[in-house]
Image (cartoon, helix red, strand yellow):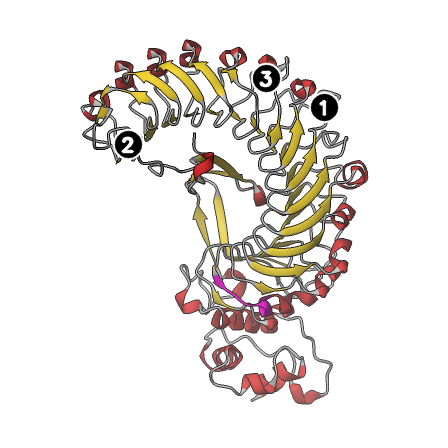
Amino acid sequence: QKTIDYLVDIGISTREELEDPSSPQYQAADWIANVDEYQIALPVEVDNGSDLIPHTPFTERYALAVFYYATFGNSWKYGLKFMEAVDHCEWFMDFITTSGSMVRMGVAQCETPSGFEDNLVHKLVMPNNGLAGSIPKEISFLHRLTHLVLPFNADLVGSSSLDGLHALTYLSDLELQYCGLTGQIPEFMGNLRALTNVGFGNNLLSGPLPSSFFGLTNLELLGLDDNALTGPIGPFGALTNLKSLYLEDNRFSGELTSDLFSDGWTNIVELDLSVNILDGPLPSNLFSVTTMEVLDIHGNNFVGPIPEITVPHDNLFFLALHENKLDWRIPETINNLVNLAHLDISKNNMEIPFPSTFPEMTTLRYLFTGDNPFEDHPIPEWVASMTNLRELSMKANRLTGTIPAFIGGLTRLQVLDLDRNSLTGPIPDEIGLLTGVDTLMLNRNLLTGTIPDTFSLMNDLDILLLDSNELTGTADVICQNANINLTQFVTDCGEPNPEISCTCCSVCCHDSNSTCNNFDWHVNLDPIWEYGFQRVVYSFSQNLLPPEDTP
């Protein structure tokens, strides 16, 4: 009873909660009073008239016990020594990552703050540990908590999980991405002025951000990606210390104004605003922030030209502009992006000619120009100079003429996409020199002849699309090669009267079947940059094309 009275008097839990046998509070209080062999003493006697001290090892141990029961600790992936009869600052386990570094999970750090006699919890770290339920409000009594890192716990749900954060004024690192959080970001978040890193990405948060949120001017990393958040983009300019801003896959709106880059995001390194409803022209100073390395604004409604790059920019290596309404041409000054590795302008309203400086862009590894209303033109000769390319997609670019032999010199290619053009003549033998290619799309052209014998060298092939051409002969060079194992292989081998004999095709098409393999097959290279975590996701959009889009 003394334990319950003490917990009620300091305000950490209510008496109703503590007397409900089904509640995490009851379970935690019963454990700390009757089960815990560590038997930490109450800070003061409730009946001695002394002032009660709320921030003590006892209250922290109780708060951690409530956290354990509220998040179904008995089902965690790793127990992390929680509820063992040792100091709760020892409730952790150390893990060695595949890279050889050590990661501590659980109560990852305790320290004795100035003016205190006891160790208090500073870091609570449990990524991908199978937490469920909700973060209890009692976590607010981890008064000196600086790091709350609980990402990748998909069953950690509900809007109430944020309620206990209101008193954590020392919190600098808050990571709750890839959980199941719902509702709106609460107004009190703006009071947590010590925050430098916030990760709320890949949750179910919705609505506008509170105005107080934009007072968090110490933020260096902000991840709100993959939610249903709304509101104007302009207020984010107040966060002038940002180095990483991830807002992709939301419903943010408005224009990118010049002051966002001249006065706001002057320290930005990674900026991902993709798949929102941003619009208007791109500001002329878009490339003025010399620290910027990643700029991803694809999937919006931007119009007008790509701004000129007036001075050399050494750091930008990733530029994704696809799926907008941009027009005119790639600027001649594109070569000022001297270390650019990724350029995607596909699915816009761009024009050619390509800039005369393009042959200087030898650092490019990924180039996507597909689905723009270009005029008829051959595969440009400057492609031959881009020997560092890993992926080249010129889908639906109105390419004409033959596939040049110099394509075989791009020996680092992994993806070659020339789908939906008007290329003619035979497939050159030199394509067989692309032994690292895993995806080759030559479908929906006017190619003739046979499948070259040199295809036998392409042992890494996974996807090979040759349908909707005028190719003849057999596919034996593929089908009889035990070293080639394709997941998708499509030719015009359909009955009646197959144009190609194929014994290993996954799909056989025929000219009379206009819906056969009538997919977009849009190559989508989608790096995930947030929170210092980089991985590359390769996928293909296989949405059916409308019949009028089929050549």
Nearest the viewer among 174 and 279 is 279
Q: Is residue 455 above or below residue 518?
A: above
Mark positioned earlier in the residue sequence (3 or 1): 1
For the residues labelled 3 and 2, say whether their Cβ atoms are less than 8 Å apart.
no
Q: Is residue 77 magenta?
A: no
Mark positioned earlier in the residue sequence (1 or 2): 1
For the residue labelled by badge 3, is the local secondary structure a helix, a strand or a loop? loop
Quadrant including the C terminus: top left
Q: Nearer the viewer, mark 3 or mark 2?
A: 2
Residue that numbered label 3 is attached to? 361
Tell me which residue sits at (69%, 42%) in the image: 279
Residue that numbered label 2 is attached to? 510
Residue 441 pos. (x, y %): 39, 27
Which mark is drawn over residue 161?
none
Res. 268 image quadrant: top right
Q: Amino acid at mark 2?
A: His
Residue 469 pos. (x, y %): 34, 23
Q: Amino acid at mark 1?
A: Ile
Residue 443 pos. (x, y %): 37, 27
Q: Give the residues drawn in magenta, as a range.
A: 155-161
Res. 411 image quadrant: top left
Nearest the viewer among 488 and 14 is 488
Residue that numbered label 1 is attached to? 309
Q: Quick one: label 1, few (<14), some, or many (20+) residues within 10 Å?
A: some
Q: Quick one: label 3, few (<14), some, or many (20+) residues within 10 Å?
A: many
- Regarding residue 538, the answer to whether it shows in the image is no
Q: Amino acid at mark 3?
A: Met
For the residue labelled by badge 2, is the local secondary structure a helix, a strand or a loop? loop
Q: Is residue 98 above or below residue 150?
A: above
Q: Quick one: label 2, few (<14), some, or many (20+) residues within 10 Å?
A: some
